[in-house]
Amino acid sequence: MIKKRLSFILRFSLLVLIEWLLLAYALFQGDSASWFLAYFFSFVLLFVILGCFFRLKFWKIERHFSKKSLQDGDLLSVELHISRRFYYPVGYLAFEQVLPSSLGKKAPLIQVSYPFLKKEMIVELGNFRLKRGVHKFPPLQIKTSDPFALLERRFALDHKESLTIYPRYYPGILEKLDRAAKHHKQILHTQEVGNFHGLREFIPSDHLSSVDWKTTAKTGQMMSREYEKSPEVKMTMIFYGVEHPLFEHTLRAAYSFIRKMSEQKKAIDVILFTRANQEISFSLMQQPFHKTAKIFSEIEPFSQNKIEQMTAKISKINTQIMIFTPEIRPFSSKIINHLNLSIVCFDKQKQLLPNVIVLEKAAFDLLNGGENK
């Protein structure tokens, strides 16, 4: 800060010295050329002095992002909407936006504009690839100068902003599970057809599979079977977030499954084992889904073993259970052979184990599918 002030004082002193020498030369020489040079530089010095009084805080600067709903892997563009209340000549504005370290090592976004007398303008800073999590942007750095770019000044926009990036959603999660294992339907279909109730006359909205062909052949009139709906069967989904190279793939699969179940209004209890908390438990239908999505955006992996804690939790659950985990090796045979339990992972070597559903890793890569809104 002291160096910047000293540089400003030295530059300004140099301009004043040049102006004094030009005036002295004009008084000594006395011709029109020397006076024109002195007057012209006086005009330049006047603009420089006036430019020093114009403060950057008079500008209204807002960040605008190209998307409102942000997912892991999206390409995000940043625009600056700039406005001011009155005209004043400004040589240039240089913007530098340092990206959050949580996004990884990325170069800052830098752009230069030349407003001069403009009152409003839009500046495109550039774009960058997003990563799941909550990212806090540092202040925007702005640099400007007088119209002749002789004296530079810097300003930091105090307004800080954070972005919540949700996991990528794969709407075809149920189809992916279907291809991975035939027995998963017994778990995913939480609404059974029910018990046979009786026959009734066929109506156009009935499915052909409900037609009782024997009765139809006897009576000569199409008859449909009618069923009593059985009560909804609850399920418990567990996400075991152990540190692993496929942690993000597993989280995307678990998040997609939860979101799909929410869209279908299914009754599911959710248990998350993460680093920040030993355990996060909630019922899917008892809170708005945006809160569930926020929880998934903030999940971080853990390194310590929590198998005993999860085993104790499973022993108290009487519903069907589905566990999403990037690592299946620590699991005991007691968990793997549990009657009402299925384990979803990406380890192809474990696909012959009972109750294990192995998904394709490529199906949950960021550049392969997923909803992109």
Image: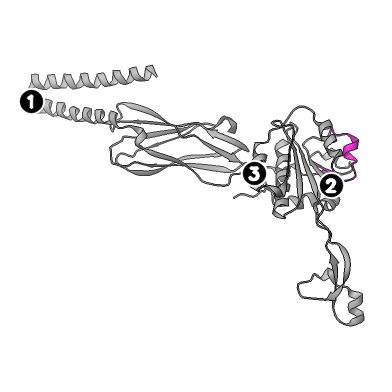
Residues at marks 1 and 2, CA–CA distance in whole angstroms: 101 Å
Residue at x-position 87% and y-position 46%: 340
Tag 2 residue: 319
Q: Give the mark, 1 or 2, whose residue is nearer the N terminus.
A: 1
- Classify 173 as above or below 152: below
Q: Amino acid at mark 1?
A: Asp
Q: Within 10 Å of the Cα at label 1, are there few (<14), some (14-19), or many (20+) other Cα atoms?
A: few
Tag 3 residue: 291
Q: Amino acid at mark 3?
A: Lys
Residue at x-position 66% and y-position 40%: 295
Tag 1 residue: 31
Q: Amino acid at mark 2?
A: Thr
Mark 3 against mark 1, which lies toward the viewer?
A: 3
User: Is residue 103 toward the left or the right of residue 180 in the image?
Assistant: left
Residue at x-position 73% and y-position 30%: 302
Residues at marks 2 and 3, CA–CA distance in whole angstroms: 24 Å
Rendering coords of residue 10 (x, y %)? 29, 18
Which residue occupies the foreground of this view, 133 or 181?
A: 133
